[in-house]
Structure formats: structure tokens, C-alpha cells
Amino acid sequence: MTHDWSGGLTSISDLDRTDVLKLFKLVDNCIKGKYEKIGLGRVIGLLFFEPSTRTRLSFEVAAHKIGAYPLVVHDPSTLSISKGESMEDTLRILGNYCDILILRHKDPKTIRKAIRYAGVPVINAGSGSVEHPTQSLIDIYTVYKFRGNPDGLTFGIMGDLKHSRAVHSLIMLLTKFDNVKLKLISPKGLELDEPFRKSIESEIVLEEISDIRSIISELDVLYIVRLQKERFKENYEKYISSYSISPEILKKCKEDLLILAPLPRTWELPPSIDSLPQAKYFQQASFGVPVRMAILISILRAL
Amino acid sequence: MTHDWSGGLTSISDLDRTDVLKLFKLVDNCIKGKYEKIGLGRVIGLLFFEPSTRTRLSFEVAAHKIGAYPLVVHDPSTLSISKGESMEDTLRILGNYCDILILRHKDPKTIRKAIRYAGVPVINAGSGSVEHPTQSLIDIYTVYKFRGNPDGLTFGIMGDLKHSRAVHSLIMLLTKFDNVKLKLISPKGLELDEPFRKSIESEIVLEEISDIRSIISELDVLYIVRLQKERFKENYEKYISSYSISPEILKKCKEDLLILAPLPRTWELPPSIDSLPQAKYFQQASFGVPVRMAILISILRAL
Amino acid sequence: MTHDWSGGLTSISDLDRTDVLKLFKLVDNCIKGKYEKIGLGRVIGLLFFEPSTRTRLSFEVAAHKIGAYPLVVHDPSTLSISKGESMEDTLRILGNYCDILILRHKDPKTIRKAIRYAGVPVINAGSGSVEHPTQSLIDIYTVYKFRGNPDGLTFGIMGDLKHSRAVHSLIMLLTKFDNVKLKLISPKGLELDEPFRKSIESEIVLEEISDIRSIISELDVLYIVRLQKERFKENYEKYISSYSISPEILKKCKEDLLILAPLPRTWELPPSIDSLPQAKYFQQASFGVPVRMAILISILRAL
């Protein structure tokens, strides 16, 4: 069953493999400039209760490019919520002003409230540490662009896997494809949460690894999320070599390895990597606008 | 004498009954999508010195819909006023950049400065607790939509009448119509200020009521503004039944009563009312964009 | 050699006299409404790390008028820089989203980083106290408009010359013209820095003056930048008469003197001057939009 885009995009689990590959064809066309200005006369609301620039700006540009007006709520703290208004009322009122509502909130329940009260299709632009579906579509589009669809590939996912919503959505998206192998590389205490791991274990082959160097040669894709120093109680330095990469470590990698990252990065992905042919994270970032254009177009076509 | 829109809209007292009804025809057309893109090539400045989302966003969407560019000053604290610039200079400079200036400021004198120095038509989007003319046009447009013009109707206005600019503009607007009766229901200390009451007393029949339950059956329109807990020194709880509504209280209301509210609401208007046929406040909110479009169109036509 | 606009505009020293006069013809046309919508389909990024309204809003309006979409980063503190991202990465990512990047930052090195990493033409909208090239073009366009090109004119520049980037760019721009004479009028400690003065001394005739009254009758242009009280350790009052103007002082000025100011102003330029025919600073401010339109058009034409 294919996804009904008229409801928006609130979880990556709504999409199946066919939906994703169909969306990617649309992204190809957006990159080539072959798209209709289907947004003309439409208003697309951007309501970010957590700071965001990358996601917000790329949605703003995407909305503009397809002809729509991006209505950005720059400072939700000035919303009437501060006067005691309920989230339900706020969503109802904002839904009045727009044709699609893009929402980021730290509480995953807010997305469900938006679906119920906004009265327009909702896009989840990040809900707590739980989901970030549009980011995972950008991630896999990058793979698709360089290697075709991800069937049969081996992915290393390195960093703070516990707190990264990008990682959660990425793994959920990878379960839709065939014979994907996952190598999870994270410091103790920052592994995937047990309930989440249980929920996907039957759908994808995964293995937990304690040092990137031991498996670097096996990977087709290395996906790196940042490690925040604040997460470490002590001995921060000893993790540096096991959970970061360097030109040295990459000497053993496949020639066509794709190094991806949702960015921002800190020490785990040093600038000395940037000029290597495997480094694709800036190209990946540049796909933010066309992937989000394709999502908006898919929704507007379904209305 | 009809209103000269080329000066903008700074007080509801500028409009007479004919102006209002003419404007409402224009709102009807905006809702039907029958309007010219008269704003093309125009810039509409939004300068809000007090927080606002509802009013600001609906003006922003309204400006966009008629083809104009909304130039939003998101954080007036970054204006050169913080470098010691006078309000007069700031208004002069901003007036340079736009064709209409929409202004909210806690000091009513600022509206008068804008008229003098901005050099473009000014719209009052809220001046202290004194006036909020565009809100009152939305309020009465809602009445007009469901009951025709408000001649002969009985209005109950409940809540903090002392501090609500929406209430002041609404009452001033109602004086333009014939045989309107006002029932004012507010806790001690939050009644209409004496000077304001004196100023309208000769133009409209009004009565002060101490409990909504005693007159609910007489009302054609019930307009509810929020009561802030902070305004009460003590015994906040004892006011709840006298100055809030409930499905119980509404059992005695007319079938075609219209319940309106400028929103946000807190405890005085509970969500248990939302599904009653008398509850019109969300529809009222949805008229924010077309009423403001009609105001902008009226001004641009007059330039 | 004429300026290659495809690189943007990062220092006024990039332009020669011919570039400037050619740009001014374009400004004339922008004022008359004779310009192409060359920005259609383009995104112009505005990234201001220091507060700005005047420069930001006029660039925003200029971008819109030529058909482009202004992508404004309203609160750079929400950028991923706060998550430890390097300025280089931030500039790279933002460069992805836009066709021109307009940047203000207190550290002049950031402009050089933007040139290197943004991958799109960069406009310097103010770098520390060093440069503000677009402001100086507005200043000299105002002179050009009223007196033709500035060859042979005598300029008085009064105020805090040490900290004003507008003054630095203005003087650098004036060195491109012939026989300009500079009279610098500033309190002790707020004179032009020695290295800057040395760097321009061979290219322009300059003289330091301790009281505006002694040379007011010689000036063709008087350019006034504000004096902040905080800069003075003591005896603030005694400077008032030497470094501010008044109708009294202006009794001795030339009839066709142009009084200019980048604004905002404080006490050095009192409102009692505003109605004099010599006061041109509000007209000067109104040239902000067309001058910035002409700069954007020049860059887009060169791409």
C-alpha cells in the first residue's frame, strides 16, 4: 500500500520502498529544475519549537522554489502559549493560516496533536530524539545518487546513537530495503536504546562494534553523528581514536565508501577528511532543498 | 462622510456604519477568492513592539495573498532605538521602506507619531489597552456572517474589560449600529474604566451585570475575553462560576447565540464548549486573514 | 581595470571611479523603476551576526524588488555554531542555499572565510569597525545626486572617526576621486587610527580640526557620525558645542552645503536642523534600497 501524502509526513515508517524510490525520481527532477510551481497561492507554515537553521532554512527555500509562501514563526516563545494558551488551540489557529504545517518539537506527542488539530497536512521536522524523517530521506537519497538503492550495502553508523533522531529515522528507513547490514559503533552508554533495538532487530541484520578501525574495510557507507563532550563523564580523550575518523584510519576503507553525516560535526569528523573522494557530507547537505521540495510537491499533489 | 482609507486605519472611530458594511462586502469577496493582486510591487511593513503572533501572522499572510511583500521587523529591540535613536527617526526610516506601516506599541502616542513621521498609511495593530480596531472588525464580521448586521442585537461582553483593547474597540464599533444592547459582565476592579464608559454611555444602552448566569438567556452574542489569574489578589476560585461558561450554563441560552472570543482563552472558556453549535470563535479566528486583506486592499485602492 | 562583480563586493577598495559612476547610473534607473527582475528564481542570503535593521531591511527590500527571495537568518545564535560547528562549515552550508550571501560580522576575518567557503558572491554588510562598503556608496550617491561626482569638493567628517566603519569606507571611496579635501573633526582619542591615516595620506589631502565652527564656511559636504556618551570618560558636556551642529553654527555655511549622516543620530545632529535645506540625511537614507538593488543587479549580471 502506498503512502497517502495528503496526511503529510510524520513518521518514516509511513513510507514503503516504492514510495521512497518514487520520491527520489521527483528529487532528481527538482535538481534538474524540472518541477511545477505547484505551491503558487499556498502558504507553508514553519513552526520550530527547538532551534534549527539547516532544516528550517532548507524548508524555507524549498517552499519558495515551488512557488509557495513560507510563513515562519521565528520565535515560538512569543506565541500565545506564553499567555496560557493550550498547544491544541495554537495548532488550530496556525493551521488556519497555512496549507501545510512543518513542525519541530521536543515532545513527540506534539506531532500527534498537530495531526489532530491543525486541520492541514503535517511534516515532522524533528520530534525529540525519536524521529527526523526528512533527514533520513536526504541521507538515503545521497546513497541512491552515488550507489543506487541501498539493497545489499553495509552501513556503519557511528557516534551517539542513543540521542540522535536522525539515526533512528535512518535505521527505520533502512529496514525497508533488502539485505542491508548495520554495524553500530558507539561508546558505552550511547548505544541504541534497548526498546528501539528490539523493535527493528527482526527486520535488519545488526552488530555492535567497539572500534571503527576493526570494521572500516567492510563498509559501503559510514554515517557519522556527533559526539558531545558533555555526554562523557570522564576519559573523553580515550574515545577519540575509537569513535572518530582520520585519513590514517581511512587508508583501509573501500575506494567507493560514502562518508555521510547529518552535520553539524565536531571532533569526530575532522576537516582533514573533507578533500578525500569518500567525503560526501557537503553534497548530502546540498540535497536538503531538493528532497524537501519533492516532499512538499508530493503533499500538494495529493490535496 | 466616508472614511479616507489613504490615511490607513488608526482608530475604529474613523469608520462609520457604511464604511464597515462596504468593507464586509470586500471581505466576502476575499473569502471567495475574488480579489485583485493590488499589492504587487508593494511592501507592507510590520512593526510590532509588543509580542504578537495571531495578528502578525494573519497580516503577513494577508499581505502576501494580495501580492505584496510583508517586511517583518521580528525583533524591534535590535532597532537603532537601542542605540539612542528617537522613535520619530525610526518611523521615518521604516516609512521609507514600505507602502503601508502596520504598528503595535504599548504607548498609544506612538500611533500618532507614526501618522506624523512615517509618511505612509498606518494601521493600528494594537495600541496599549486602548484600541485594536482590526480585531473588532473581525468580531463584527463574524456576527454579520451569521446574523447580518448587528442592529438590534443584545451583546454580553464578559471578562477583564478594563485592560482589553479588543473590548474597547468592539464597543466603539457597536455604537455605530442601531439599538444594540450591551450587558457587561466583569469582576470588581476589572470593569470598564469610568472615563471610557462615560464617553460611550450616550451612544449605546449598557448595563453592568455581576453573574453571567442571570442574563445568559437574553443574549444574541456572548463575547468572552480572558481573565488572568494574576489580576486577582485572592479568592480566584470563587469567580470561576460567575465569569466563565460551561455546557451547564449554556443550557439556558438561545439556540442561535454566537459565542465569540478574541482568543487566547484560559479557564473562562473551556474546551468542553468547542463542539456546541454556538461556539464560533475558531471560525472567527479564520476570518482574521480575509478581514485584514480587505483592509489592506481598501488602503491600496485609495493611494 | 574594472571590478569583477561575480566575486561580490567585500571592500570598497575593489571599485575604481569608473565602476562607481557606472553603478550610479544603474541606481538612477532603479529609482525610476527601470530595472529588470533579474533576481527571479534566485535566493539572497542575509546573515547578520551583529544587530542591524537599516542595512538588513533595505537589503531585504532590494532583494525582493529585483524578484529574488531574501533568506534572512534572524537569529544567528540559533545556528549550529552554538553546537560547536565551525564558521567554515556554517558558511559552506548557507552558501548551498543561496546565490549571493550578504554578511555582517564583528570579525573582519569572517568576510575572508566567506569568500573562501560560501561558494557564492559575498557582500560585506559591515565588518567590525573596518569596512562598510555599501554604506559609503549610498553616501557618495547622495553627493552625486545633488552635486554630481565629488571631484574637487571639500568634505568635513565629524564625530567618532576611530570606531566608525562607515567613515573608513567613505574615506577610502573618496580617494578614488580627484582633488577632494578632507577636514576631520573629532574629539581627542576618537581620531582616525594612525595606521589607517597613514594608508590614505598619500592619496588624499586631509587636515585635523578641533572645532567644527572654525571651518563650517569652507565645507561642501558635512558628514556626521554619532558620538556615544559612553566613549567619554568625563566632561562630556564640554564637547557638545565643538562636535555638534545647530542652526546657529550653520548660519555661516554655504547655501548648497550637503549635511549627510549614516544615522542613527543622537545629540550631535539635533532635530532643529531637519527642516533646513542643507539637511539631506533622510533623502540619503531613502537611497539605501536603490543603491543596494544596483549592487545586487551588478552581481547577478556578472554570474
Image (tube, coloured by chain):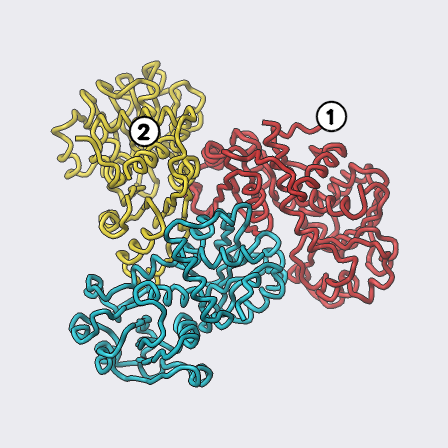
Chain colours: A yellow, B cyan, C red
Q: Position of residue B63 (x, y in %)?
A: 47, 51
Q: Is residue B199 above or below residue C256?
A: below
Subunit of label 2: A
Is residue B94 found left or right of B54 in the rendered image? right
Residue at 41 percent of width and 18 percent of height: A277
Amino acid type shown at disc 2: Asp
User: Which corner quadrant of the image does residue B260 belong to?
Assistant: bottom left
Q: Position of residue A112 (x, y in %)?
A: 22, 48
- Front-most of C157 and C87? C157
Q: Is residue B265 above or below residue A20?
A: below
Q: Secondary structure at mark 2?
A: helix
Residue at 49 percent of width and 52 percent of height: B72
Is residue B264 found left or right of C36 in the rendered image? left
- Front-most of A217 and B131? B131
User: Which corner quadrant of the image does residue A236 belong to?
Assistant: top left
Say which quadrant the C terminus of chain B sits in: bottom right
Subunit of label 1: C
Q: Is residue C294 above or below residue B178?
A: above
Q: Which residue is mark 2?
A: A139
Q: Position of residue B107 (x, y in %)?
A: 51, 70
Question: Is residue C84 at all visible to an observer of this figure?
Answer: no
- Front-most of B278 and B72? B278
Q: Which residue is mark 1?
A: C1
Instruction: Specify the label residue A173 is tagged with.
Output: none
Is residue B12 found left or right of C258 in the rendered image? left
Question: Is residue C221 at all visible to an observer of this figure?
Answer: yes
Residue at 66 percent of width and 52 percent of height: C285
Residue at 67 percent of width and 50 percent of height: C163
Q: Secondary structure at mark 1?
A: loop
